[in-house]
Image (cartoon, grey):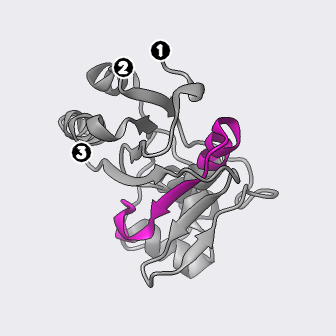
Amino acid sequence: FIDIARIKPGDKIIISGTIGDHAASILLAREDLKFKTRIKSDCSPLNKLVSSIICRDIKFMRDPTRGGLATTLNEISAASGYNIAIEESGMPMKKSVSTLCEILGFDPLYMANEGKLIAIVSKNAAAKVLSKMKRHALGKDARIIGEVKRERDRKVYLKTQSGGLRILDMITGEQLPRIC
């Protein structure tokens, strides 16, 4: 019953936690960068989190690994045929990851995650699924970050904190060399 073909306008996008942790931790270790705050990889098995939330209102789930959140949402948009809009203001991200990305010029929306999932959930059940997710240790930082739109341009948009719209394209090349 989890099928990308079930996605429709109004469905909500939930991320199970903070973004960019894995890629940031690998980058720090690989480059031997000294950083005041330790950044840990989010590498975790997701089977128990998935079991705790699974219901027919979940249309689709994916891990935002290679290419991060933005690339995964572009793949979902392309396969479903619908646009996706997400909100920068609601994006869960650790301050240390945000700072590292700002210093080094990386976009955290394209950084790998190894222990997170994206769930596309029917509008009416999103709050319930989010509540269940937050009860699990791997979902404690989960948030509703956006929704599926009616438009069928197969684009992903980020509503910025300043109120603008930024198109999030598929990643071209590698933001970081392959890390795993």
Which one is closest to the eye, mark 1 or mark 3?
A: 1
Return the x and y of residue 164 as percentages of the image width and height: 52, 80
Question: Residue extending furthest front?
Answer: 150
Residue in the image at 61% along x and 53% along y: 151
In three-dimensional space, the C-alpha distance between marks 1 and 3, rounded to whole angstroms, equals 26 Å
Label 1: state its secondary structure. Answer: loop
- Position of residue 90 relative to residue 17, above or below, is below
Say if mark 1 contacts mark 3, CB within 8 Å: no
Range covered by the magenta-colored residues? 72-95
- The tag on residue 1 is 1
Name the amino acid, label 1. Answer: Phe
Q: Quadrant of residue 173?
A: bottom right
Q: Earlier in the sequence, mark 1 or mark 3?
A: 1
In the rendered structure, does residue 163 fall within the stretch colored magenta?
Answer: no
Q: Earlier in the sequence, mark 2 or mark 3?
A: 2
Q: Which mark is residue 56?
A: 2
